[in-house]
Amino acid sequence: MTKLFDKSNRHLLIAIITLAWPTMLEQLMQTAVQYIDTAMVGALGTQATAAVGATSTVNWLVSSTISALGVGFLAYIARALGAGDEKGARKASSQATLAVLVAGIFFTVLTLSLSRMVPVWMQVDESIQAMAATYFFIMYMPMLPRTASIILGTVLRAAGDTKTPMKVGVMMNIINIVLNFLLIYETRVMNIFGLEFTMPGAGMGVIGAAVGSAVSFTIGGLYIFIVFWNHKHISPKGLSLKPDMHIIKPCMKIAFPNMLQRFGTSLGYVAFASMINSLGDISTAAHTIANTVESLFYIPGYGMQTAAATLAGNAYGAGDRDRMNNIAGIMIPIVLILMAISGGLLFIFAPPLMGIFSKSDEVIKLGATVLRMVAVSEPFFGYSTIVEGLLQGVGKTKEPFVFNIVGMWLIRICCTFVCTQMLGFGLVSAWACMIAHNIFLFAMFLIMYIRGTWNPLNENKKGAF
């Protein structure tokens, strides 16, 4: 095991921290807004929470599929910059811009046209289907700027710029919070530090939450595009936006398996949530809130994954096998420690965290139970996240695709179907199946890491596109 604080590894630690902390802060802010959104909507009642949460897994399906395109460009650009090929990186940026336009328009048409059917497919209770459909439609109106935020944010991270996506995330979150505060509630009298005043409000409820999010997505997407377009090293200014197959082919070779993986696993999340929605409002609300709470404790893993992908891509482009192995040797123990601490905190504070978002004793008790279950598996999840990030950086996306699809559909979905639909068990059994899925992924990635097959430079000492 690499010694973390050897002098020879200090520069890697600095690089890891430099890349990881802005991503962690960005995700922290996004999670904070999720917390605030859920708490604000939760104040409207269990039905409102269920209406917002019932289609959230479809958001994962769409967003993760688009993110997969970004992974292809991340690997290409990181390797190009690692090899000193700035011209190639800029050409890839122009193709990323084309991908934003094509994917953004496609998903806008797709999601808006299916907005009324999604709540039905998700087995949402008939009493809240119309509310859920309207919320979904408004959320996906700004699909083009949302696509820009996802893909171009990934491209900027590939160039080592994790601060801009962080700043954009913070800005979007502030806008979202302010608009939610003004749009969700009716005009009311407020008292702060003894000062009483009338706070105007639109009283739009769940729809107000959707409008606030849509406006913040639009502004964030436009801002990140402007920064990307004027970037010193990867700006596509002056380059053609016509398809360039010399770049698209290697990017898609990486992105396509990752896209299938994310689409397949996100579709699994949709099936998973659909089965949970069939258990009733209490289970749906508890599941939605528990997912929101849990997302905060995933931040260390996802923040480190971004650093792992970028640094591994740079090292692969430079053909530096030793540096690749050092990156893994440093990052894995760090993330295991962080996720163990994260899991411990989640276990301890599960009930009060659930209590932030719901006043229902049933929802709080059920949500706290599943959160404490999943808290134990946090280090296993963190390990899988880092190894998958390393694989993304070097363009090896086929193995994660196989592992995730098998784990999702053969373990999580099949077992959840048997437990909830055939045996009549509840939410606890569904989350037990989810944990089994996480343990399976850990085992597969551990085997791959021990064998050394994660690092292509172990077999080939020169990185190649």
Image: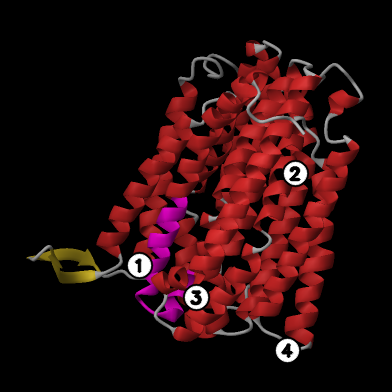
Closer to the camera: disc 1 or disc 3?
Answer: 1
Q: Residue at image x 54%, y 14%?
A: 238
Check residue 444 in the rendering and tell me which mark sits there, or answer none.
Answer: none
Q: Could you tell me residue 435's position as x and y percent?
A: 72, 65
Task: Characterize the local packing of mark 3: few (<14), some (14-19) or many (20 or more) Cα atoms within 10 angstroms.
Answer: many
Check residue 50 in the rendering and tell me which mark sits there, or answer none.
Answer: 3
Q: Which residue is mark 4?
A: 424
Closer to the camera: disc 3 or disc 4?
Answer: 4
Q: Residue at image x 56%, y 66%?
A: 347
Q: Residue at image x 12%, y 62%?
A: 193
Q: Which residue is mark 2?
A: 258
265, 324: nearer the viewer: 324
The N terminus sits in image quarter: top right
Circle 2 sits in a helix, a strand or a loop, which is it? helix
| Relative vertical location of residue 90 with respect to residue 413 in this rendering, above or below | above
Q: CA distance from mark 2 to mark 4?
A: 34 Å
Task: Characterize the local packing of mark 1: few (<14), some (14-19) or many (20 or more) Cα atoms within 10 angstroms.
Answer: many
Q: CA distance from mark 3 to mark 4?
A: 21 Å
Q: Kindly check if marks 3 and 2 are in contact, taking CB atoms under 8 A apart as contact.
A: no
Of the residues under marks 2 and 1, which one precedes in the sequence? 1
Q: Could you tell me residue 399's position as x and y percent?
A: 85, 44
Q: Which residue is mark 1?
A: 40
Is residue 46 on the magenta stretch? Answer: yes
Circle 4 sits in a helix, a strand or a loop, which is it? loop
Of the residues under marks 4 and 1, which one precedes in the sequence? 1
Of the residues under marks 3 and 2, which one precedes in the sequence? 3
Q: Could you tell me residue 113's position as x and y percent?
A: 57, 61
Residue 286 can be seen in this image: yes
Give the residue type at disc 2.
Answer: Asn
Is residue 119 on the magenta stretch? Answer: no
Q: Could you tell me residue 323's position as x and y percent?
A: 74, 21
